[in-house]
Amino acid sequence: MPVSHLFIEAAFCQATPRPPVWMMRQAGRFMKEYWAIKEKYTFLEMVKIPEIAADVTMLPVDLLGIDAAIMFCDILVTAEAMGGGLSFHAGQGPKFSNPVRTAADIAALRIPDIYESLGYVAEMIKIVQERLNNSIPLIGFAGAPFTVMSYLVEGESSKDFKITKLLMNNHPALAHSLLEKITRVTIDYLNLQIKAGVNAIQIFDSWAGALSWDDYEEFSHRYIKQIIAEVRVEGIPIISFCKGSSVFAPMMAAAKPDVISVDWNADLPSLKKSLPSGIAVQGNLDPFVLYADKSVIKKKIYHLFDRMEKENGFIFNLGHGIMPDIPFDNVKYAIDIVKEYSYKKLV
Ligand code: CP3
């Protein structure tokens, strides 16, 4: 059920009195309340117990007053549902016990029944929507096929994606068969989220910035385009995020998302002007600004807003996620600053 709200209006390029605000990784480790829950459960338990995932989703709603909630989950649950064997170890990030590197490995991956394997996400969405009670929209999400593939192939986080690129370069047909499988599951998964009641979707292609232009087109863009076409529902905006969007924005726009989420390299007003009309932008404060003095935080946010005010279709966010050691107080301050702002053109 679509919620009428600032965030949805901005996502569809309608005029708003101020930019709506939410922050990537807003439900996370920079909050002591997150750690209080984490003491009792592992990360994957937090994700898979619908009541707990709903509690974590609600933390930034209750403590920060953001304009959109994002469901608490992880982009790697699709890869786990396919049989990757996912675990998280403190300080080391995700690990897959069965890295996928050969034709046999790819063939062994399942296309799971989505309700059987990821039904816990649908249950969590329903609980969160009851608690939100139409106050603000709920964003669902999934990883983009390239980024999810990189974890499955490397078996863990990677700095250079060496094994993934070797697969793409030496065995492109194999890479495509893996991407096709992930794409199928991602489409089913996002449709499950939409049926369960999310109000918007974000596709995270976190590591696409490691790709050349041609490789982005061949191994990422075409699958994102297919996903967007197959999950499109009227009234539910689709946000396309990648680290590297400063470069790839024109191609991202060709996949027809409603919103492009921009990293902090680009001058946002110029990038917005370069896009086809009707595509909104989200971003793009360097998250490291949130370590700085409050006067600096305010100056940088207002500088961005002053230059964006003639542009309908702007959602304030960071260029990437909040780091775990950013002071909570600074995050709260940044959100309060946004909510106090009012576009001069409307005053
Ligand atoms: O934004 C939110 O608050 C919603 C929740 C969310 C998480 N992961 C929770 C999480 C979202 C949207 C994600 C997406 C995600 N997961 C991405 C794309 C986002 C991006 O920033 O580009 C990626 C690449 C992952 C994979 C992943 N999950 C990694 C690499 C790690 C370890 C990272 C690290 O910094 O240690 C995770 C774990 C994870 N996902 C945590 C959280 C809160 C930390 C778990 C813990 O408590 O230890």
Image: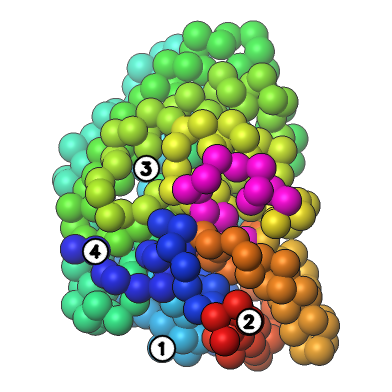
The reply to whether residue 214 is in sight is yes
Residue at image x 19%, y 77%? 130
The reply to whether residue 85 is in sight is no
Disc 1 versus disc 4: nearer the observer? 4
Q: Are marks 3 and 4 in contact (CB under 8 Å)?
A: no
Residue at the spot of label 2: 344
Q: Nearer the viewer, residue 43 or 314?
A: 314
Name the secondary structure under disc 1. helix
Q: Are marks 1 and 2 in contact (CB under 8 Å)?
A: no
Image coordinates of residue 142 in percent, x first then y, are 41, 48
Residue at the spot of label 3: 78
Name above or below for residue 327 compared with residue 85. below
Name the secondary structure under disc 2. helix
Q: Nearer the viewer, residue 66 or 154?
A: 66
Disc 2 versus disc 4: nearer the observer? 2
Image coordinates of residue 187 in percent, x first then y, are 31, 37
Residue at the spot of label 4: 2
Instruction: Name which of mark 3 and mark 4 comes first in the sequence.
Output: 4
Name above or below for residue 97 compared with residue 282. above
Name the kind of residue labelled 1 in the image: Asp
- Residue 102 counted in the magenta span: no
Q: Is mark 4 within 8 Å of ligand 1?
A: no
Name the kind of residue labelled 3 in the image: Thr
C-alpha separation, residue under disc 1 versus residue under disc 4: 21 Å
Disc 3 versus disc 1: nearer the observer? 1
Residue at the spot of label 1: 62
Say which quadrant the C terminus sits in: bottom right
- Answer with left or right where residue 327 lies relative to residue 30: right
- Magenta range is 270-283
